[in-house]
Amino acid sequence: MGRPRALVAVVAGALLLAGCGTGPSQVGSAAIVGDTSISIDQVQNLIDKAVREHPYAQKLASEHKLDLLGRAFVGQLVLHELLLKAAQQEGISPNYGQIDAQLAKDPLAGAVPANSANEAQAVSQVATRARDHREELTDANLAQELADKTMPDLAVAFDYTSIGSLPTSDGQEPPQGPAAQKAAYDLGRQFAADPAAAAKRVGADNQYEQSLRQQAASQGQNVDSIPPLTGVNVVLPAAQAGVLAATPLFGSATGTVAVFPYPNQQGTWFVAVVRQRSDDKPVATEQPQTLDPATKGAIGMRQLQPYFDRLGVRVNPRYGVWDVVGLTVVPDQDAAQGLVLSSGAPKQQ
């Protein structure tokens, strides 16, 4: 009689523990977004479909690299669910007329060839084309609608410097490649640990940059075409930020430090302290920039960054971890495209 009673006690305890939690279980889930589970079976079915339809996926299978596809699918499906949550929150809906017109031409038709040169790009294309095309086009449309809705009210105030283009104060050449990335990460962690020291460092870098520009101008060089590499208390509306509005600078909360590749500046890293982020009232701007659909969509996707933490998204470790900068799943934090750090706590969000 002792064993049955012990067994009943164990089962009762297990049921009690199971009843304590709320929401979907991580068991069988590739990711959980709020109260929605993205199942491992769903991801596997998409991988199988991709291998059937796309020569590039067959190439990945032969090289035992289908894990790349798994991460791509999980990343895209997480963004899909975040888009649905954001659209509901912001009261926006897709433009079904545009979606129907696009679907009639179906830009996602056609297989991704095995000889595609850029692996990361090819993997993303395979994942996009293996998903339901209407759903994928709807996501793209919603992202653009989200950008249109949020950009007029969004602005950030920040201090920043850059690593990789600005010579050091002792006249040495700037670090390049992995050395530049490491220097940028180290500096970002320093900024997060001591925001006051960050202001001092950025101020010194800004003075140094201005002296270099004056020197170059005195030598007859055109410095107007060179993008600014440092800035103190910069206030920038999203409507005037262009591609920078698609970076973590515009998705991070007040008091965070963002480290990411400087847009359109090969080999340069952007290290910024977000002093204030506001998104609740119209921002006075000059003539807003005209954006192509891809850039506008990327800006809309960036507005999903706060939802990830707000909804407590969980990614199954078998696929990897979430890259807050790249808005996708990567094998580990070392593979992330940058850092987003909370002040006083040098750990990636």
Image (cartoon, helix red, strand yellow):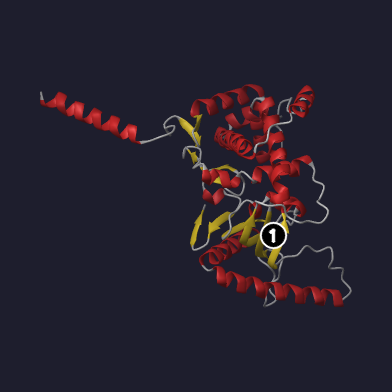
Residue sitting at 29 percent across and 29 percent down? 15
The number of numbered discs placed on residues in the rendered structure image is: 1
| Residue wearing tag 1 | 268
Judging depth in this view, the residue of 120 and 293 nearest the camera is 293
- Furthest-right residue in view? 220
Q: Nearer the viewer, residue 278 or 110?
A: 278
Location of residue 207 with respect to 304 vertically, above or below: below
Q: Quadrant of residue 301?
A: top right
Please give left or right for residue 24 compared with residue 286 in the image. left
Q: Secondary structure at mark 1?
A: loop
Considering only vertical position in the picture, is 110 above or below 272?
A: above
Closer to the camera in the image, 14 or 225: 14
What's the residue at 76%, 74% (across, down)?
210
- Hey, which residue is sitting farthest left in the picture? 1
Point out residue 69 in the picture as x, y percentages from the top left corner: 59, 33
Dot 1: few (<14), some (14–19), or many (≥20) neighbours within 10 Å? many
Q: Position of residue 101 (x, y in %)?
A: 79, 25
**Where's residue 274, x and y in %?**
61, 60
Tell me the quarter of the image containing the N terminus: top left
Can residue 168 be seen here? The reply is no
* Position in image of residue 230 (x %, y %): 70, 67
What's under tag 1, amino acid-wise? Thr
| Point 81% across, 76% down: residue | 214
Q: Residue at x 65, y 58 (%)?
A: 177
Residue 87 visible within the image: yes
